[in-house]
Image (cartoon, grey):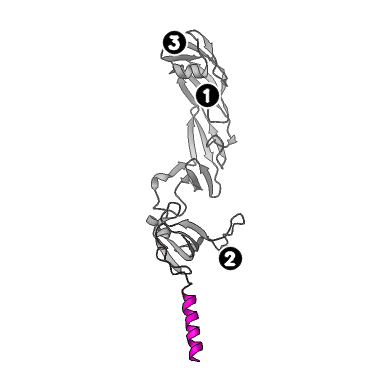
Amino acid sequence: MKKYFILLLGAVILLSGCVDQRTVKMGDNISIDYTGRLQDGTVFDTSLESVAKANNIFDPRRDYEPLNFTVGKKGIITGLSDGVIGMTVGQSKTLTILPEKAYGQINPEMIQVYPRIQEMPATESFPRIINISLSRFEAEIGTGHKAGDVVAPPGSSFNYTVKNISNEVFLSYNLKVGDTLPSTGLPWNITVIKIDDKNITVKHDVNKNYTFQFQLDTFQKTPWDTTVTDVNSMNITLRHNAIPDTEIQSMFGPVKVHFNETSIIMDSNHELAGKTLIFNATLISINK
């Protein structure tokens, strides 16, 4: 009996030597399963499909599998990366992560507020003569021109008369009262109503109840419609029509759009900015 006990004890010692007793250190490549919650218990992210389904955040386009990352490298919030240090394979840990080590505090400068009712002038003026650099002029229109030449920039609906050429080129718009031009940035035309020695005045050709979408950038329009609610000799009144909360992409990242009764609020902060996060993390492996 003593012999069998010794053999059994030896087997236990041998097997225990096979258990990974390493602890996570800075720079280790590791994988974890995790579930992230807000302080009110709302689950906002998880690597576990069953948890995602149970909390109605399941995304069929996503692969639910352990998260792999290098401890201390960018791409993982600091609180999670720091929090796994010292863990062993199979260990689970609850991490409470303050905003400073998560997605930061809310930055007021990243929140823009616009009125839902806006006014723009019904008429506008711009200088009759403009000047551009000689290099730009030659790049866009060509070389060999002289004062008095009539030139038309590529894609332009009107032309100019060259008034003077030196290091700069002075150009005069060749327009007359009644000419119609496309408006810059707006989906209607403008009509020339006055020309004097210095300025050209134009009127926006738009009627009440016209509905359109502003162009946000080259590829994207506003997700909401805007309606012209009034037009008079002085102003054009615009109403931005409310939509449910949505998110748009900008060159700086996602922007959350929210309408209230009086304003459009466009927030570029991360959706988890300013929030304390609670992570339940289980260490799956340490991959040296």
Give the number of the mark in front: 2 or 3. 2
Which residue shows up at 50% across the image and 19% down it?
A: 139
Q: Could you classify mark 2 by the number of other residues whose Cα lies within 10 Å: few (under 14), some (14-19), or many (20 or more)? A: few
User: What amino acid type is highlighted by mark number 3?
Assistant: Asn
Which residue shows up at 62% across the image and 57% down it?
A: 60
* Boundaries of the magenta span: 1-26
User: What amino acid type is highlighted by mark number 1?
Assistant: Lys
At mark 1, the secondary structure is strand
Residue lying farthest to the left in this orientation: 100
Q: Nearer the viewer, residue 147 or 30?
A: 30
Which residue shows up at 56% across the image and 60% down it?
A: 65
Give the x, y percent position of residue 134.
44, 16
Nearest to N terminus: mark 2 or mark 3: 2
Q: Nearer the viewer, residue 49 or 247?
A: 49
Residue 165 image label: none
User: Which residue position holds label 2?
Assistant: 50
Alpha carbons under labels 2 and 3: distance apart: 74 Å
Q: Is residue 4 above or below residue 216?
A: below
At mark 2, the secondary structure is helix
Q: Could you classify mark 3 by the number of other residues whose Cα lies within 10 Å: few (under 14), some (14-19), or many (20 or more)? A: some
Q: Nearer the viewer, residue 3 or 123?
A: 3
Give the number of the mark in front: 1 or 2. 2
Magenta stretch: includes residue 110:
no
Alpha carbons under labels 1 and 3: distance apart: 29 Å
User: What amino acid type is highlighted by mark number 2?
Assistant: Ser
Magenta stretch: includes residue 16:
yes
Give the x, y percent position of residue 72.
41, 55
Give the x, y percent position of residue 52.
56, 62
Q: Is residue 218 above or below residue 178?
A: below
User: Which residue position holds label 1?
Assistant: 203
Q: Is residue 263 visible?
A: no
